[in-house]
Image: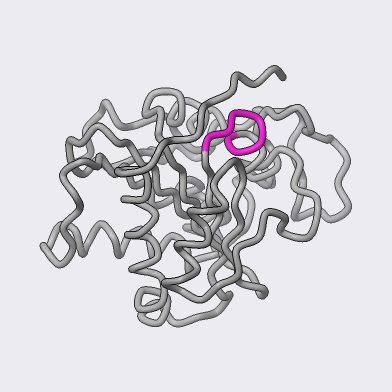
């Protein structure tokens, strides 16, 4: 049963958007899956983490409180669609300084205004209430990589040593209104967008990325957390 204190909103169709909390440590880490509902590699990995933690296969350091939001876009995940029920790309809808109403492809539709979607409001509320030291967002892409935003290249390099993916500060195309911009560039909140190879078998995904994610979760236990900035939108 999900703690109601960790339900941060509802989707367009009314599904709860929640983050399950594991641990009671001072270092809060947020793991997000399912921003894009057609990227099952990410949300299945997030759900696998919950399963493995609950069955005792994984034990987290006591310093950590890990929050796992397995499906930020539950409507999209249920229908294998990138966008939410309003056809909005949630990773273009965050209220950032660079939000842009123009789009080159319908799959990147940013919404009528920045922060217009209930899932986006839930995302912002989740970040504000949890106040994580790190956000890891699980996606998939034909060009897998560890995309880092904010002052966390060292973290991306440490993850790369575990999963072999290249750490990159630029995914290769504009992403206005994205979580990386909202958290990483505007607030200096470390944001890792792990782009898993699209179409990879879930067991392969788990084998390749499990240790990289565990490395990320514990990275700031013994290191200084980047100083947060206040964003002015």
Q: Is residue 151 above or below residue 106?
A: above
Q: Residue furthest left?
A: 56
Identify the magenta region: 183-189
Image quarter in which the C terminus is found: top right
Residue 123: percent from left, percent from top: 50, 34
How would you classify the magenta stretch by its main secondary structure?
A: helix
Q: Residue furthest front?
A: 223
Apparent side of residue 54 relative to residue 233 in the rendered image (left or right): left
Which image quadrant for residue 184?
A: top right
Which image quadrant for residue 131?
A: top left
- Is residue 185 within the magenta segment? yes
Which image quadrant for residue 188?
A: top right
Q: Is residue 38 visible?
A: no
Closer to us: 84 or 24: 24
- Is residue 218 within the magenta segment? no
Q: Is residue 199 above or below residue 146?
A: below
Q: Residue at x 37, y 42 (%)?
A: 223
Residue 54: percent from left, percent from top: 15, 57
Q: Is residue 128 above or below residue 22?
A: above
Q: Residue at x 21, y 33 (%)?
A: 3
Residue 114: percent from left, percent from top: 71, 28
Apparent side of residue 144 relative to residue 65 in the rendered image (left or right): right
Residue 105: percent from left, percent from top: 84, 55
Image quarter in which the N terminus is found: top left
Q: Is residue 211 visible?
A: yes
Apparent side of residue 127 relative to residue 181 in the rendered image (left or right): left
Q: Is residue 3 above or below residue 197?
A: above
Closer to us: 211 or 194: 211
């Amino acid at each position: 049963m999900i703690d109601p204190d960790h339900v941060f909103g509802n989707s367009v169709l009314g599904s709860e958007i929640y983050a399950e909390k594991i641990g009671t440590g001072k270092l809060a880490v947020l793991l997000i899956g399912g921003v894009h509902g057609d990227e099952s590699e990410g949300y299945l990995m997030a759900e696998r983490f919950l399963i493995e933690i609950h069955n005792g296969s994984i034990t987290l350091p006591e310093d950590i409180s890990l929050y796992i939001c397995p499906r930020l876009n539950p409507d999209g995940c249920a229908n294998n669609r990138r966008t939410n029920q309003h056809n909005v790309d949630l990773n273009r809808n965050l209220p950032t300084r660079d939000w842009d109403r123009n789009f080159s492809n319908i799959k990147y539709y940013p919404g009528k205004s920045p922060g217009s979607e209930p899932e986006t409001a839930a995302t912002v509320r989740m970040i504000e209430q949890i106040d994580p030291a790190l956000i890891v967002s699980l996606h998939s892409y034909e060009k897998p990589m560890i995309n880092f935003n904010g002052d966390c290249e060292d973290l991306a390099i440490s993850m790369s040593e575990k999963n072999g993916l290249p750490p990159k500060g630029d995914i290769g195309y504009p992403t206005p209104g994205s979580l990386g911009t909202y958290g990483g560039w505007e607030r200096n909140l470390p944001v890792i967008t792990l782009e898993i190879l699209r179409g990879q078998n879930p067991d392969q995904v788990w084998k390749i990325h499990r240790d990289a994610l565990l490395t990320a979760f514990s990275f700031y236990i013994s290191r200084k957390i980047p100083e947060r900035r206040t964003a002015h939108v």
